[in-house]
Image: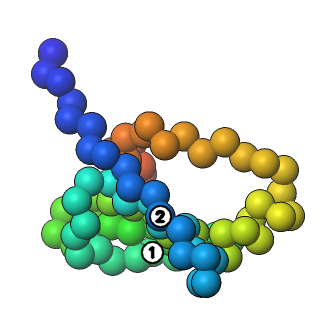
Amino acid sequence: MAKQKIDQLTVSYDKDADVLYITEGKPREAIGEMMDDGVIVRRDLKTKQVVGFTIVDFTEHFATHKPQNIPLKAHFSALNAMA
């Protein structure tokens, strides 16, 4: 069985804009697809694979909901099957 490479996840937060960015692997050009509740799924322009997420109004998501666990060790490829 071949090993599947796991890219590093980068998580950054812009306090002034209240936006959380989660990116898999190296930065690259992507197109955003708005989902419910201010979550943007970012896809690679060429492959259409999920390469990250952007959560707008991040603190509002957690001020009005119970605390949530966000698994940071994940394969975005599972989401690509849904595309």
Q: Residue at image x 27%, y 44%?
A: 7
Q: Which residue is mark 2?
A: 12
Q: In the rendered view, tell whether residue 19 sits above or below residue 21.
A: below
* Residue, disc 1: 33
**Nearest to the observer: residue 3 or residue 83:** 3
Observer able to see residue 42: yes
Judge from the rendering whether residue 60 lies leftward or rightward of residue 14; answer left or right.
right
> Tag 1, which secondary structure?
strand
- Residue 30: percent from the left, percent from the top? 29, 74
Residue 18 at x, y = what percent?
63, 77
Q: Amino acid at mark 1?
A: Glu
Please identify the residue farthest to the top as the structure is shown.
1
Secondary structure category for the residue under label 2: strand
In the image, residue 68 above or below residue 59 = above
Mark 2 neighbour class, 10 Å CA radius: few under 14, some 14 to 19, many 20 or more: few
Residue in the image at 49% along x and 43% along y: 72
Could you tell me which quadrant the N terminus lies in?
top left
